[in-house]
Image (cartoon, rainbow, N blue to C red):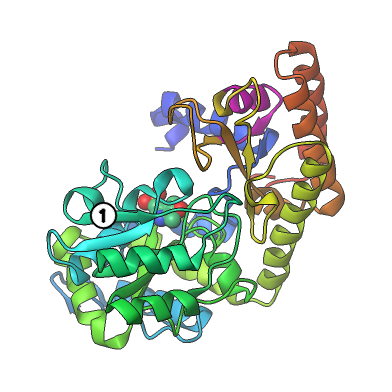
Amino acid sequence: MTLRSQDPEIFDLIMRERARQRDDLELIASENYVSQAVMEATGTVLTNKYAEGLPGKRYYGGCEVVDVVEDLARTRALRLFPGSEGVNVQPHSGAQANAAVYLAALKAGDTLLGLDLSNGGHLTHGSSANSSGKLYRAVHYRVNERGIIDLDHVRDIARAEKPRIIVTGASAYPRLWDFAAFRTIADEVGALLLADMAHFAGLVAADLHPTPFGHCDYVTTTTHKTLRGPRGGMAFAREAHMKGLNSAVFPGLQGGPLMHVIAAKAVAFGEALDPSFRGYARSVIDNAQAMATTLVERGVTLVSGGTDNHLMLLDFSDKSYSGRDAEQALGRAGITVNKNTVPNEKRSPFVTSGVRIGTPAMTTRGLGLGEAVLVAGWIADVLDNWQDEGSLLRIRGQVHELTGRFPVPGIG
Ligand SMILES: *Cc1c(COP(=O)(O)O)cnc(C)c1O
């Protein structure tokens, strides 16, 4: 029986969400649109299969087919990131991948040094609300007054705190990471080094962002952000750490792997290995920089003044409206973003003084430099008129006219 006839309530909601994704302009920096092929692989009979363990070493029978699937995913992942030595493609999400690394590398109470959450870091980098901040002794580095990570500051904290692991990577940091410099600091204090490239993995794969491989003991990522695969995670380690990492993922944290998602990961890695992916990633960065330039010209303050990657952080600290106000006004204009804390945040995390904007999804649907400038102009118009419903509706019409001309892969 089809979903539509069996459960029209859920079917209709999925159709509504499909229309929202098609009609509105998606600028959430952590989101993307997967290809039809990735979507297809996700919705297959592989969801029926239990495959605890690793290829060739399973706890269930009937794994001969899914073994090949997982091996392909691993081989492609290693090929996609030159310098990588081993990978586990089973983590259900980026958060699970990080938890697995910590479980493998740390003992309860060990010190973890990561970027502060309100400065762009992620919950799993030692927030007190997350297991990483409850099981381990988390300390944090911050960005400087220009919004940039100052390596002297990181070195000072590392010397004082003697972390067991230093975590690099972030969720809202618009600049590049210097993994070689972090390696030097980690070596000086005897720390392990983790790169959480959840946000910029696609840019690393395209060779448009410094690679953490060769510098880091562990590298984790999501597969659904700039990498444009299914929702999920994966974790890489140096050969010597792989055994510990594998047993941290299973049986340490997870049960059976999601084989349908692992198949979709393999498909996405295949797409990222295609030379055309580099053009996509280049365009993601070009679009972000064009938007940043236009926003600055229109008087919007950006944390660190611009971007080197796929995202930017708009700072409303000196404005009468908050991040929440801006998110809501942009939403009424058909532009989807998320409110975000900014460095030295004075409002609550539910209100915030910033908005994070990213170009991975809009670039996937084919928007280029001309459209990026246009969209940035609309964002500035919305901010200038955030309480004027008439202006917001007028912009909404223009947004929908634009998205109507750029079909989403797999949706049309
Ligand atoms: C998105 C993100 C994660 C978590 O990914 P989930 O799949 O949502 O668990 C981890 N680290 C960073 C830096 C992220 O941006």
Instruction: Write the residue at 60% across / 55% down.
Output: 174
Q: Residues within 10 Å of mark 1 (few under 14, many from 20)?
A: many
Instruction: Write the residue at 67% across / 61% down.
Output: 308
Quarter of the image with the C terminus in it = top right
Dividing the picture into quadrants, the one containing residue 396 is top right
Q: Does 157 lie within the magenta span?
A: no
Q: Seen in the image, is 185 located left or right of residue 26?
A: left
Q: Residue 291: x, y in percent?
A: 77, 47
Q: Seen in the image, is 39 located left or right of residue 140?
A: right
Dividing the picture into quadrants, the one containing residue 112 is bottom left
Instruction: Write the residue at 16% across / 53% down.
Output: 135
Helix, strand or loop at label 1? It is strand
Q: Does 328 lie within the magenta span?
A: yes
Q: Residue 285: x, y in percent?
A: 70, 60
Instruction: Write the residue at 75% across / 12% down.
Output: 388
Return the residue nearer the eye: 57 or 27. 27
Q: Is residue 231 visible?
A: no
Q: Seen in the image, is 187 located left or right of residue 279?
A: left
- Magenta part of the protein: which range? 325-338
Q: Name the residue under label 1.
A: 138
Dividing the picture into quadrants, the one containing residue 90 is bottom left
Q: Can residue 109 be seen in this view?
A: yes
Specify the amino acid type for callout 1. Answer: Ala
Return the residue nearer the eye: 266 or 101. 101
